[in-house]
Amino acid sequence: LFGDDYTVVFVLGGPGAGKGTQSEKIVNEFGFTHLSAGDLLRAERQREGSKYGELINTYIKEGQIVPMQITINLLEDAMKRSGSKRFLIDGFPREIEQANAFEKQVCKSAFVLYFDCPEEEMAARLLKRGITSGRVDDNAESIRKRFETFRKQSIPVVTKYEQDNKVRKVSCLSDPSTVFEDTKKHFIQYYT
Ligand code: UP5
Ligand code: MG
């Protein structure tokens, strides 16, 4: 559907690794459009008249992956509406089936930006954010479930793309601007 003149970069990493934080910085410097699958699902959950509000809320609270066609449709709509040709797809694909379906139905990916972060650090960040975020999944119980889903279903996506030599890995342990110094290196080709 979206052809060779479109660029899709998948931004992956565990819950709280810093996908959203770094995506914002990439947008500012490289003119990409940032689409967070989680943000799109949360917006759909709140949308008046949505059929999926309740379902989405349950999946998010349980740290499980929402049935993929819902997410793929939201992403595709957002891509069309944006009028952009360069996308950071943040927090998606979270399982191999989603990766294959998206690449077949919507657009091929250029590469995967993978933010690597130890679970202890991610948990600390999420618990801290949970004090003010209002996110239904920023509590100890949901965080534990999100990590479990990440290990079982999402890490295999990274492994799959590693086999195709498409993963660019960045450690997320330092402060956001230091992490961005590393992130940037992977976008040199997109300087305008
Ligand atoms: N922070 C960030 N970087 C930092 C740094 N370098 N040093 C210190 N602190 C740092 O950051 C998280 C917190 O850490 C913030 O407070 C930030 O200030 C701080 P953020 O940039 O928000 O990290 P991010 O990786 O984006 O974390 P997020 O919580 O958004 O990740 P998740 O992957 O858990 O959440 P997402 O919104 O992608 O998905 C939520 C749920 O939606 C999923 O669990 C799932 O149920 C559902 N979903 C699907 O079903 N399908 C999908 O395709 C996508 C989502
Ligand atoms: Mg995020």
Image (cartoon, rainbow, N blue to C red):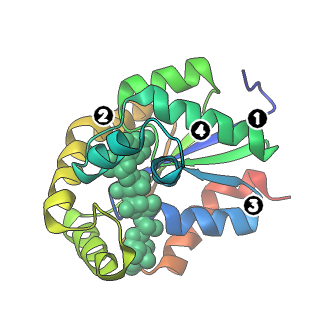
Q: Which mark is residue 30?
A: 3
Residue 5 point in image, percent of width and height:
81, 32
Work out whether 126 lies above or below 53. below
Considering depth in this image, is 53 or 101 the residue closer to the camera?
53
Q: Can you identify the residue that label 2 sits on?
A: 156
The reply to whether residue 115 is in sight is no
User: Residue 28 vs residue 83: left or right?
Assistant: left
Which image quarter holds the C terminus? bottom right
Task: Give the residue type that dot 3 points to.
Answer: Phe
The response on whether ligand 1 sits within 8 Å of label 3 is no
Element on which disc 2 rests: helix
The quadrant of the picture showing ligand 2 is: bottom left
Question: Residue shown at 57%/31% (left/top)?
Answer: 73
User: Residue 112 vs residue 68: left or right?
Assistant: right
Task: Give the residue type that dot 4 points to.
Answer: Leu
Q: Nearer the viewer, mark 3 or mark 4?
A: 4
The first of marks 3 and 4 along the sequence is 3
Residue 24 point in image, percent of width and height:
61, 67
Task: Assess disc 2: are there few (<14), some (14-19) or many (≥20) residues with their C-alpha within 10 Å of its C-alpha.
Answer: some
Task: Give the residue type that dot 2 points to.
Answer: Pro
